Amino acid sequence: MWRVERHKLIRQKLGVSGRVSISDLVRDTGVTRETLRADLEEMAAAGDILRVRGGAVIAPAPDDPEASFQTRIQDHPAEKLAIGREAARLLPRGASLLIDAGSTTAAFARSLSARPDLRILTNSLHVARRLAASHDTLLLGGVPDKAGQGVYGELTLAQLRRFRVDVAVISPVAIDAAAGLTNFDLREAELASAMFEAAERRMALAHAAKLGHRSRVSIAPLEALDWLVTDRLPPAPWPPMPRLVIAPRDA
């Protein structure tokens, strides 16, 4: 298979699944691993793809903002609800929680109706509205974002640093084995990092489409997590995680 044909095939596979492995390409093209590594390195240097160990993923678009909250809350709804239910089962009785603002943590909040023993501290307007009547809930102060999803800023960070909680629960934009947990927005990444610093244990919620990708701003390395709750096994290669929790699809 000619070089231009291999590059076309790689782009097609990335368009379907968002990731491609060298092993699959060896099978589909009949060329050597060394040749395919050179292809991927060339495409990565051109910015067409992002090279990862064992293959490649779609290159992130750093100038493209994250979709709106209203759009994201309708994306993968069944998976997010299943993840939320599984995450709720993991929480110790009477635990205090920090919850960041996001579509997956909004779904997670729906699953906490059966856990009135939990105490909630959040920057999410959506989470606070849902849980205020049933839980001991504190909404952090700060400047609301334009979409009305959450509050951010120095006031939010200053208030957060006064607290210690049992578990911080966040929903990052992307999770990658090498890059760790990342967000697109600097304010959101700073707040998520501060939540992790204020917590004894740390949980990330992410549907499988977020795994194997990275965004612009680092939150924490993968090893900082106590739990990663998702709906499908992460793409290989992935480091061993004793607290990787897969939510049943029919949950």
Image: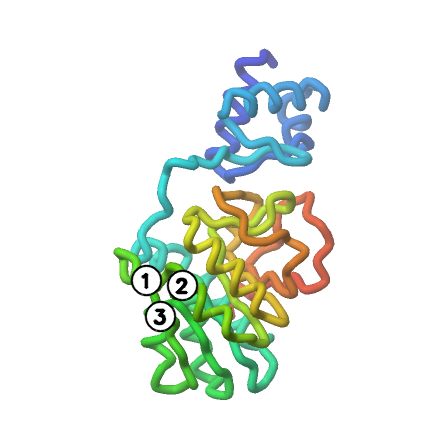
Q: Residues within 10 Å of mark 3 (few under 14, many from 20)?
A: some
Counting residues from the start of the chain, the first of labels 3 and 1 encountered is 3
- Tell me which amino acid carries mark 1: Gln
For residue 232, what is the image quadrant? bottom right
Query: Residue tagged by mark 1?
Result: 149
Check the image and report above or below for 3 versus 235.
Answer: above
Residue 170 locus on image (x, y percent): 50, 63
Picture residue at 55% right of the left edge, 61% below the top: 204
The answer to whether marks 2 and 3 mark residues whose Cβ atoms lie closer than 8 Å is: no
Residue 30 locus on image (x, y percent): 68, 21
Residue 131 locus on image (x, y percent): 38, 80
Query: Residue tagged by mark 2?
Result: 101
The N terminus appears in which quarter of the rendering?
A: top right
Q: Name the element at disc 1.
A: loop
Q: Residues within 10 Å of mark 2 (few under 14, many from 20)?
A: many
Q: In the shown orientation, is residue 23 left or right of residue 171?
A: right
Picture residue at 26% right of the left edge, 56% below the top: 146
Q: What is the residue that sits farthest to the top in this orientation?
A: 2
Check the image and report above or below for 54 versus 145.
Answer: above
The answer to whether marks 2 and 1 mark residues whose Cβ atoms lie closer than 8 Å is: yes
Q: Mark 2 and mark 1: span between their CA atoms?
A: 6 Å
Query: Residue tagged by mark 3?
Result: 141
